[in-house]
Amino acid sequence: MGFAGLLVPEEFGGSALGCVEAGIVMEEIGRTLMPSPFLSTAVLAVSALSRGGSAAQKIRVSAEAIGGLVVGRACHR
């Protein structure tokens, strides 16, 4: 459905929507108990990438995330 591209800027193939729209999607995911990596991929990984990634990383990883080829994960050390 393209949910992973909600927070991705348009120049990288995403929808360029905001946190309110992501929150609405998360609310519906929770309501239906859909097992989805939305939070880790579309919110955490995309946000980290937009803040600290190079242009080449943003192009490659954004396209892979939107296409469902990668799943983002967060880890704490």
Image: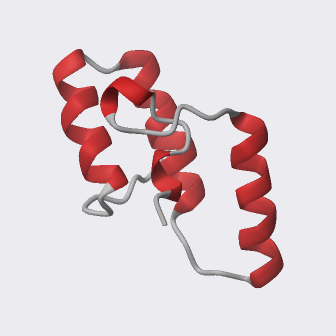
Residue 33 location, x and y as percent? 73, 83
Q: Is residue 69 left or right of residue 73?
A: left
Residue sitting at x 45%, y 37%: 46
Q: Is residue 21 left or right of residue 43?
A: right
Residue sitting at x 53%, y 57%: 3
Residue 21 location, x and y as percent? 73, 44
For the question of whether residue 77 can be seen, the reply is no
Q: Is residue 63 left or right of residue 1?
A: left
For the question of whether residue 19 can be seen, the reply is yes
Report the front residue among 65 and 17: 17
Toward which corner of the image does residue 63 lie, by quadrant?
Answer: top left
Residue 6 location, x and y as percent? 55, 44
Toward which corner of the image does residue 30 lie, by quadrant?
Answer: bottom right
Q: How many marks?
A: 0
Residue 67 location, x and y as percent? 29, 58
Residue sitting at x 45%, y 41%: 45
- Colour mapping: secondary structure
Residue sitting at x 42%, y 29%: 10
